[in-house]
Amino acid sequence: MNNHIFYSVCLAMQILCVSCTPIEVADSEQAIVNPVDATPIKLLSPDERFGDLFSAVQMSGMFSDSKTFVDAIPLYPDEEILANYHHSKNQPGFRLNDFVTNNFAVPLDSPTHFVTDPTKTAAEHITILWDVLTRQPGTVTNSGTLIPIPKPYVVPGGRFREIYYWDSYFTMLGLRASGRWDLIENMVDNFSYLIDTLGFIPNGNRTYYLTRSQPPFYSLMVELLAQEKGGAILEKYRAQLQQEYDFWMAGAAELTHEHPALKRVVLLPDGSIMNRYWDERATPRPESYIEDIELVKAHRLPIERYRDIRAAAESGWDFSGRWFKDHGNMSSIHTTEILPVDLNALLYHHEIILAGAYQQAGNSVLHKKYLLLAEKRKQALQRYMWNDRDGFFHDYDFISRRQTHNKSLAALFPLYFNMAEPLQAYRVANVIQRDFLKPGGVTTTLNNTHQQWDAPNGWAPLHWITIKGLENYQQHELAASIRKRWIDVNLAVYKSSGKMVEKYNVYDLELEAGGGEYPVQDGFGWTNGVLLILLDQ
């Protein structure tokens, strides 16, 4: 096998587990076996597969959305397509658009052709949508970028034609309200399959996502399923819980005070180890190729900033002033220098769940180990991320050794996981009431940077975290106010448009949400899930 190809694929996959058994196929590329029909699946990202053709297509602007081409399915073998391209591209009359049309099956913008029934309530509409947004494992086409998974799953909708890691948890909440435990268990099994096969859960099940993950909600998914199936679920998924945790903590044993950061782990001066978002590559994202190149070019950024852009994508908050030194200027993005409060709260929960899984297995040594790790992380979060002056949790810049200046709803994650002291929670609630509460719910941040994860936008997952976090500390009146405002804006948009969308303008209910690299999407998995469970409660 070509060593360069082998190295590139291994790097992309971040192979961390011996249970992943790649096979060698005829064209000497790395592959995995399709769990549906045992055929080989290439794991190369489309920019690696198609090189100068890929760049030419993405830079041509023939598609308004860069994600369109990376989701396209080649109609012929890669080598044949590339040979024809190199032979014909300089010929008179060559048209790149025609070449792409003749060699790739381009995905439809609206593949379901679903039409809303205006006589249905929002809850009835969402219940119908579960089947519309469900994909079957047998529909995988091996030559594309979709990574096959063995069981049916729910996609967000719109341009998002695959599963997404953290989106799926909030979708599962709505499935719980619908009693669809079959789909919930299928989705947990699918994420477990990805852990077993790839060594981690990628951002989504596409080959161009194999260098990064997303906020680690796997432990919450397992916990959710255990609420229905009982404690044996922790034992069933214990190996995958461990492997997912090991992915996020990879490199921790190698950290020193001279070299305190490696991949997703950072050693702090007091010996605490906390986590950051990361990506294995520092190149333009294939699914946002022209956008990334133009951003770096326009702001004269060093190429290393591509990694910060990718790391922000791993955070799920792509993009937000959270990741900028200058909150209004994306050229100051420095995601990999930031320890996010939400990520570390999520990993605290993962440690607690791992401790419970080992207790279930009768392993008292590992039970105590992960309880201790969780307590150490909690203490570090309190030490580095609580700001007693303004009564709020902040992200921490470990390079400058100070908290970031941006306030965001990420501060509610310690309340969601009961990591805050009662007085801290009271003070956080005061800040939410005073600064974040708007007519349509709560704003994601206080700054309007024209990025989609900033003001004036509100998002379903952060409303769920905020409402439940406040309820954990008996802030019921504020939680109820946020709940009502969010439900009302969801229902108003549904009534006027027949759609559930991915984000809402919570400042001005007459305006659509804005920002981001693509139009507002409808569908929409996590909005459906959170609204349905809030209505159910």
Image (cartoon, rainbow, N blue to C red):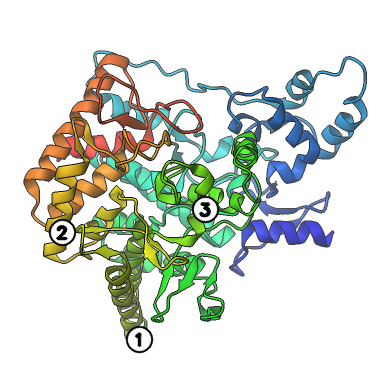
From the viewer's side, name the closer residue of 350 and 450: 450
* Mark 3: amino acid: Ala
- Which residue occupies 77% across, 18% down? 98
* Residue pointed to by mark 2: 425
Q: Residues within 10 Å of mark 1 (few under 14, many from 20)?
A: few
* Mark 1: amino acid: Val
Which quarter shows the N terminus? bottom right
Q: Which mark is residue 365?
A: 1
> Dot 1: what SS?
helix
Q: Residues within 10 Å of mark 3 (few under 14, many from 20)?
A: many
Q: Position of residue 269 (x, y in %)?
A: 42, 79
The answer to whether the residue labelled 3 contacts the one labelled 2, judged by CB atoms less than 8 Å apart, is no
* 243 over 177 or under it: above or below: below
Q: Nearer the viewer, mark 1 or mark 3?
A: 3
Q: Nearer the viewer, mark 1 or mark 2?
A: 2
Quarter of the view holding residue 386: bottom left
Q: Position of residue 85 (x, y in %)?
A: 86, 30
- Which residue occupies 67% across, 24% down? 61
Left or right position of 253 against 374 = right
- The alpha-carbon separation of the residues under discs 1 and 2 comes to 33 Å
* Residue pointed to by mark 3: 311
From the viewer's side, name the closer residue of 226 and 499: 499
Which quarter shows the C terminus? top left
From the viewer's side, name the closer residue of 161 and 337: 337
Q: Which mark is residue 478?
A: none
- The alpha-carbon separation of the residues under discs 3 and 2 comes to 29 Å
> Dot 2: what SS?
helix
